[in-house]
Amino acid sequence: DNTAIYQWSSSAGNFYGFTKMGSDHADQACDETVLGSVEEGYRGCQRKTTAGRTCQEWTSQSPHAHSFNPADYPGTGLARHNYCRNPDLKPGGIWCFTTDAGVQWEHCDPLAMTTTTT
């Protein structure tokens, strides 16, 4: 797969070009396999908490500021997406910061794996 994400670069209205982003972005395939004792290996595409709240992107600091940036947590599945992860091995499994300003974070349930039978 040669899909790439490009970021627009400009300053004060001056165009500088596009920058090819790394592979730590949302173009990754979803794998709903749950791995690890606290689901730390989950690389699926769940974007909602168990209460149904939408997850905040890991690279966003709004509405909740946090220290979980992808560069400081390599190999944990954090990227420019809002998928549930467990970068700090929190008991209870995958979680995310929410887009609800009144609720900082919540746990998530992995999406159901689909199986095909023939």
Image (tube, grey):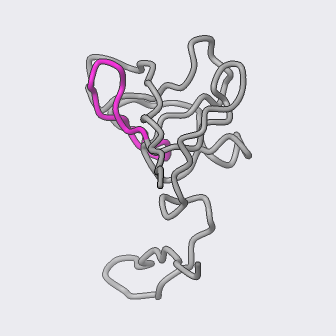
Judge from the rendering whether residue 65 lies leftward or rightward of residue 99; answer left or right. right
Q: Main secondary structure of the magenta part?
A: loop
* Residue 27: x %, y % from top left: 49, 64
Across and down, in percent, residue 76 comes to: 68, 40
Please provide percent x and percent y for residue 14: 37, 86
- Residue at image x 54%, y 26%? 94
Q: Residue at x 53, y 59 (%)?
A: 29
**Quadrant holding the N terminus:** bottom right
Q: Is residue 79 above or below residue 39?
A: below
Left or right placement of residue 59 versus residue 56 in this view: right
Residue 74 in which image quadrant = top right
Asked whether 58 falls inside the magenta stretch, the response is yes
Count of numbered badges drawn on the protein: 0
Q: Is residue 98 left or right of residue 24?
A: left
Left or right: residue 107 compared with residue 71: left
| Vertical position of residue 23 compared to residue 57: above or below | below
Q: Is residue 19 magenta?
A: no
* Residue furthest front in the image: 118
Rendered location of residue 38, percent (x, y): 66, 20
Q: Residue 91's quadrant in the figure?
A: top right
Residue sitting at 46 percent across and 87 percent down? 16
Pick the residue in front: 31 or 15.
31
User: Residue at point 51% right, 30% down?
Assistant: 66
Instruction: State which region is magenta.
Output: 46-61
